[in-house]
Structure formats: structure tokens, C-alpha cells
Image: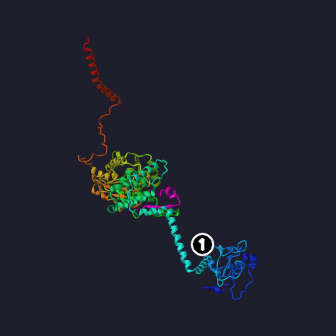
Amino acid sequence: MGRKLDPTRKEKRGPGRKARKQRGAEVELARFLPPEPETGRKKLSSHGRKRAAKRRLGAGRRPPGGGGGGGGRQEPAGQTTRGQSGFSDGNSKWLAPAKAKKMQSKGNHVELSSDGEVEEDNWEMEEDGSSEEMVDDYGASSSEEEELLPIEKAALKQKSDREGLSEDDSEEEEEATEETSKQKIGQKEEEDPDLQLNLDIDEQFKLPTNEEIEREDFLAACDSLMVFLPAEPPDLHVIHERIKGNMEVLQDFVVKREEGRTRQEYLALLRRDMAAYYSYSDFLLMKLMDIFPLPELINFLEANEVPRPVTIRTNTLKTRRRDLAQALINRGVNLDPLGKWSKTGLVIYDSSVPIGATPEYLAGHYMLQGASSLLPVMALAPQENERILDMCCAPGGKTSYIAQLMKNTGMILANDSNAERLRSVVGNLHRLGVTNAVVSNCDGRQFPKVLGGFDRVLLDAPCSGTGVISKDPAVKTNKDEKDILRCAHLQKELILSAIDSVNAASETGGYIVYCTCSIMVEENEWVVDYALKKRNVRLVATGLDFGKEGFTRFKDRRFHPSLKSTRRFYPHTHNMDGFFIAKFKKFSNAIPQAQKDEEPAVEVAPPPTIPDNVMEPSPKKKKLERSKADEEQKLPRLALKKKRSLQAQRKPLKA
């Protein structure tokens, strides 16, 4: 096991090179040390010898008779108070340091004044019978304290100082420390206004007066217009605390409300404060307050201030998720599987390389795609060798996912009405290795006439974007009622065209998936309920085992009970962009006739068809017919003018 070290046999080391060079200092110190008998005393260390010498010097300079009790002693004319610095039994109490002025000395050195007297500020007491010895810097004898750390030495010194204090002095010290601590706390409360603010918040919440509200509105308007005012704009911290207090009152309104105040006043103040704190328009906040309960609304607004996690989809046409994850980890990417519901998704936490420029990305091994964009394709569930229409396909993430699930079999028609956005679709399809897609640039509302008979249709309709506010914060203020209704009108036209493009007699299909990145009821449940009334379709389960059910009633509207099978996804609940998904099953290709009690159809009626046997007239013939019609319109006017002129000629002249 080896030999154990015996500390009693430890050989003490001699002075080092630096100590040997400084041996001349002992000769200089010998002048201050008068000869004294060393019988029965332990050998002092260098610091102890210095302190003893200075004490003796001070005692030698004191005039005779100074060692008495000091009761009726008179000082000589030339003697000052400083000359009483010597130590004796009579003035031992005087030498004890004052409690309020007691300071811990930073070193063990005692300085002499210019005339050889000891400085009173640096006095350090040491008992004659003390057994402590300190390390000799000049090579003198050392003791067991040589092995102590500096902090241990300081602790021993403080302990010896505390033992020398009397009980009365300790009580005075405690009182002094309590008074100083109280003074410090009072100063902190004066310096820190947040402490006083928190005390005020704990009190009962009260609504501000109308004058205060008008003043804050005026300051906020001036701040938005960049108008300089000597007064500061309203503090966001105060507004946030007011929102929390208002929420507490509204949750227990009967108990905590202020007398004479109605619930509408609290809601109006809450809406105004949230609009100022989160920078939303009043219109959008009213819509959101209708959709969410108040506690959930705050969570939704807070979630929109944080970006969603970066997610990628593995392209199984070229690689496997396990191999892709290992390759990205080797490049310094921190990732995890997206969830149990997805077999291809990966979530990226951080990366030392740009995710959109890795060799794996350029080789088409993955696609940057949001987690919510995977859900519509999973609900569509495309099968191999089917004919599928992606009506609004840009930028091509869902189209490539459909091709991946179909294993590049069958046919996909990727359509978009914006030709500029189709460039990204073509680039992504080539990079990802999709070979069964046809790209078209047509208006989706005219698509049944262009091509029909598809097995499945995916409609990711254009919307207001209220579910992706974290990506586009401009939605907070640039949307109004007209924008929502305009999007809803377009979505109703597109969904009817998508239903008409599906073949109900398909053996494997006959399904339509409608989805939007909006959370507005006007763009989701309202449109789905309209499609149920206008076409022979019914809602079926989406196949997604998570997400919130769609609304079957909203305010004064009542929707079809089957809308429970639709799914809503929120950023504060599922940590993905706000999304709505509905899946239809078409059971008949016939279009039902509109009834009188139903609202008129939204789509524009098609123009009347012209028989093939009727020849179209030539341009010259059209011009002749137009000129004849103009002459026929001119004839009555010319005849009327001629008749009036004849009547004027027949009138008799005045005499």
C-alpha cells in the first residue's frame, strides 16, 4: 500500500534564496530590541519581536509617573495626548478599540511615525503568554502554523480578537449593526422604486380615471408619430402589471370588482392595454377575445412573440432519418426527432453551420419545413399510383412530401396562380429528386374546366396569416374586416372548385383536404360549413390524434355538428404555427340545386355555351351590324327635330 507520511518526522526547510538575501534586516531590527532576559519564555517570531520592541519603545518615551491610575495626573506643558500611547494596566481600557470604529487590519505590520512613535490606527494586541508563532520571512524559526492557509490564519486572528471583547461591548456592537442595517434597508427602498411598486401591486386593483386614460392615449399617439414631449410615454412595465391585475379581477369579478364598475369597462381597459403592450390593432384583439378565453389569450399573445422551432423534413427518396441525423450531428448540429406523430421530422435547436447551405441540403436530403405544414399531407394520406392535385402548391414543401409518400409513382399536378412563386417550386422539386410532378400556372377557381377527375385534392388556401404572426408581425396591425371577408370569399370559391375536381367514383380516393394558416372562424369553420351545404360531401376524421376540435358554434352562428372532426393547432398549445385542417369525402359527383331559403352561391356562374354548328360572325359583319343599330337609334331623334321645325314655321307672325 506504500508508506504513510509521519508529520512528526517532517523535516523543516531552511530559508530560501530570497530570505538569505534579506538577512541584513535582522541587524537593523536589533537596534530597536533592548536586551531582555529570555528565561522561561518561548522564542518569538519576527513579527512578535517587532511588536514587542515597539511596545517597549513607547513605554521608554513616556515620562515618569505615567503608569499610575491617571486620576489626578497632570501633563507637562510640552506633552501631547499622542504621548500616551504606551501600554500599562491603568490605561488598558483606553487601548481597547472602539466598537463603531473597529476595522480588521489587512496585515501584521505596525508602522512607526516620523518621530518613532507608534501609530494608533494600526495597533494590534498580542498577549505575552501567547503560544502562536508566525512564519519568519527572514529565516527565523518556524512553527506548526507554517502549514496553515492565509484564510485560516485570518480566522484565528479574528477569534482571538473576539475573545478579548467584553460582553457589554458585544451588545453595543449588535445594536450598532442593527441600526446600520435598518438604515441600509431604508436607503435601498428609497433608491429602488420597484419595491414600492410591488407593494402597490399587492393592493386591490382599481381602474384608472378617464383623464389618465386619455393622457396615456395622447402620449402613445405622440410616441408613435415621433413627436417629442417633455413627459415620457406610458411605462410598459406598469401596463403589464395592470393587465395582470385586471385579469385577476375578471376571473373573480363578483368578489374583486370595484363598486360602480361594469364588466365591460374592465374588458375595454384590458383590450386597450393589450393593444398597447403587444402592438395589436383593436379589431384583431376583439376577434381574438371572441375566440380564446382570457387566460388562454394571454398565452397566445405571448407565444406569438417567440419564434417557432426550426424543423426539417427528411427526404426518404434519397436517405433515411437516422442517417441524416447522424450526418448533421457530425457537422455540429444539435437536433432531436420532431415527435412520435412524425416519422420524418427533425427539430433543430442550434447549429454551427447554416442549415440551408449544408451539403446534405444541397443534395436534397432534407427540406426546411414547418411542423404544421406536415399535418395536411398526413391527413391527405396519398396512395401510390394515384392522381393528386395540389391546388396552391408554392413553395413546394407539401408537393414534395406527397411525392415522397407516393414513392415517385402516379401523377401530381402542382398548380399555383403566381408564376414567380413557381420558380421555387421547380427548384425544390429538382433538388429533392421528384419525378412524378407536373407544374402548372392556372387560376384555381377555373380548375375543374382545365382538368378534373383527381383521386385526391389538397387545398392550402390563401388566408390572412393570423396563425403565423411570429413569422410576420405586420399581421398585428395591417388586417381589418375587409381583408378577412375578402379571404373568406376567395376560399369559398376555391373549395367548391377543389370538390368539383375530385372524382367521387375513385376506388382509393375521393378525398379533399382543406387547410389554412389562420385561426379566424370566418376563414375556417364558416367556409367548411358553406361547402357542406353546396356540395355532396361530408366531413371525416383527419387521422391526427392531437389538436383541438373545431367550433360547432361561434357567437350567434351554429355550424354542422360534424365540424368536431376538424382540427385546430395553436402556437401556445402545440408549439407550432396556428393551423386549421378539415378533410372531406365526396360521395356524389352531382351538384345539388340551390334552394330558395339558402344563401346564393359564391362562385360566378359560367358563361353560356355556344353550339359548335353556329359560325362566329366575321369582324366586318360585326361592324356593319353595329352601325345599323346606331342608325336605328338616331332615326327617332332626327324625326323629332324635323317635326319641331315644321311646327315653328306654321306659327302666325305677330302684328
**Would you name the residue on which mark 1 appears?**
101
| Residue 320 figure quarter | bottom left
Q: Is residue 237 magenta?
A: no
Residue sitting at x 39%, y 58%? 300
Q: How many numbered circles are shown? A: 1
- What percent of the width, then of the height, locates residue 641? 28, 20
Image coordinates for residue 326, horizontal then vertical, percent: 49, 64
Q: What kind of residue is marked 1?
A: Lys
Residue 612, position in %: x, y? 30, 37
Give the extent of the magenta segment.
342-371
Residue 114 in which image quadrant = bottom right
> Residue 19 location in percent, x, y?
72, 77
Image-quadrant location for residue 564:
bottom left
- Give neighbour class at mark 1: few <14, some 14-19, many 20+ (Cα, 10 Å): few
Q: Using the image, determine if residue 361 lies above or below residue 63.
A: above
Q: Residue at x 52, y 71 (%)?
A: 179
Left-right relation of 154 to 469 = right
- Residue 368 falls inside the magenta stretch: yes
Q: Is residue 155 above or below residue 576?
A: below
